[in-house]
Image (cartoon, helix red, strand yellow):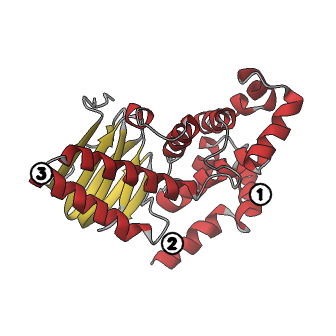
Amino acid sequence: MAGAILYDSYEIECKRLSDFSEIAKRNHFFELIFILEGTGVQTVNKNRFNYRKGNLFLLTPQDVYSFDITIPTTFFILRFSEQYVKGKNRDTSDLIRQVEYILKNASHRPGCILKNKVDKPLVASFIENILNEQQNQQLYYNRITEQIIDTLITIVARNIALKLPKNVTEATGEPVLEILNYIQDNIFEPDNLRAKKLSKHFNISLNYLGRYFKKQTGDTLQAYINNFRLRLVETRLLHSDMRINEIAYEFNYTDESHLNRAFRKYKGMNPSEYRKLHMSNSG
């Protein structure tokens, strides 16, 4: 699947669609998509989410997505590259790395990323201001637009950070962020996530690796890997029609029984019960 190319550091588009012409789309940059009006279904990486006015989606590089539009929808789309984030004059380089990690950490997560209720009207206001600046093009409108975009990206990062390991903050060092990125990139390759492999890959003593990870994140290495995998399983249960045995196979569990035991420990019920409960609640 060929990916679109971003020629500027950021692009803004606002469009109304009755049909999303492409079956599945993949880009090599970040996209923030805000629903100004309309309803339908977003599909990203095999997961489905019913969207409505006020939803904000973050699509990361390599995500595969599409929209099935029910009611004609007006999309606000902000595209920006990883270099846009890196090129900002942040207070510290650590903060740049933190924002980069947080944005990448959104991968595999379908649905609206606004978890902090007070941020929802704030985001809507920022997007309205961006559109006004682009339409009126008064003095310094590009500079003002960039400042609003920077704040918007920071708000997005704050909402994604609500799901990060409990000890990860703006002061967290680069090595552990690289380890977290590596784990997420290799979550479907369990052999790459063995402690010996991680120790060798990051040139960290095997004996020190576990202590370092726990100190930096508040989780043991194995607990973080297990819980991250189970969060993805949870996403499949809630937002896909995959069978339990298919999910077990995708995430390298020995069999469905193995997944049932792990998920029961994680959520207090087996995957089928969890899916049934949330389907009944949503209905």
Residue furthest out toward the right: 207
SS type, badge 1 = helix
- Image coordinates for residue 71, horizontal then vertical, percent: 20, 66
Observer-nearest of 74 and 233: 74
- Whether 139 is drawn above or below 96: the answer is below
Residue 24 in sight: no
Q: Which mark is residue 279?
A: 2
Say what amino acid the circle numbered 3 marks.
Answer: Gln
Residue 206 in sight: yes
The answer to which quarter of the image holds residue 48 is: bottom left
- Image coordinates for residue 75, horizontal then vertical, percent: 23, 56
Observer-nearest of 80 and 260: 80
- Whether 280 is drawn above or below 223: the answer is below
Question: In screen coordinates, is 252 left or right of 96?
Answer: right
- Image coordinates for residue 278, horizontal then vertical, percent: 54, 72
Label 1 environment density (alpha carbons within 10 Å; few <14, some 14–19, many ≥20): some
The quadrant of the image that shows the C terminus is bottom left
Say what amino acid the circle numbered 2 marks.
Answer: Met
Q: Are marks 3 and 1 in contact (CB under 8 Å)?
A: no
Q: Which residue bears the numbered disc 1?
A: 261
Question: In screen coordinates, is 108 left or right of 39?
Answer: right
- Image coordinates for residue 117, horizontal then vertical, percent: 46, 72
What residue is rendered at 44% in x and 45% in y? Answer: 45
Say what amino acid the circle numbered 1 marks.
Answer: Arg
SS type, badge 3 = loop
- Whether 203 is drawn above or below 120: the answer is above
SS type, badge 2 = helix
